[in-house]
Amino acid sequence: MPSLTSTLQGRVFSITEIGWMGIFPKVAATGDPIPIFHGYGTLFVIRLVGSKPSEVYQTFRFIRECYIYGIMDGKYLGDLSDRQVERFILV
């Protein structure tokens, strides 16, 4: 099945700690955050690269896009009034 093989290149099927199924980069690690960026339909895996107590924002590195069934295209966001907004630096 060449189309599936090429689609999954560098990715694996997995289930998150809370039971969400999806396709993730092979290099993703347990604990890597998957933020939902307001106004953006794609999810990304990011990784903390270090923060000092004196820094206002934590710094994260972009790993790769991912897909989680039921969360894509803002379906999971619902009412934003009860969501916590976090700011961070993405490098």
Image: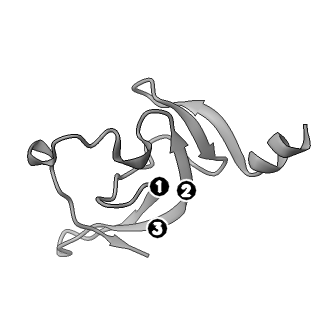
The residue shown at (49%, 66%) is 62
Residue 65 is tagged as: 2
Residue 61 is tagged as: 3
Q: Which residue is mark 1?
A: 42
Which kind of residue does numbered mark 2 sit on?
A: Glu
Q: Position of residue 73 (x, y in %)?
A: 41, 48
- Disc 2 crowd rating (10 Å Cα; few below 14, some 14-19, many 20+) is some
Spatial separation of the CA atoms under disc 3 and disc 2: 12 Å
- Disc 1 crowd rating (10 Å Cα; few below 14, some 14-19, many 20+) is some
Judging depth in this view, the residue of 69 and 11 nearest the camera is 69
Label 2 with label 1: CB-CB less than 8 Å: yes
Quadrant in which the N terminus appears: top right
Q: Position of residue 39 (x, y in %)?
A: 32, 61
Judging depth in this view, the residue of 6 and 62 nearest the camera is 6
Quadrant in which the C terminus appears: bottom left
Which kind of residue does numbered mark 1 sit on?
A: Thr
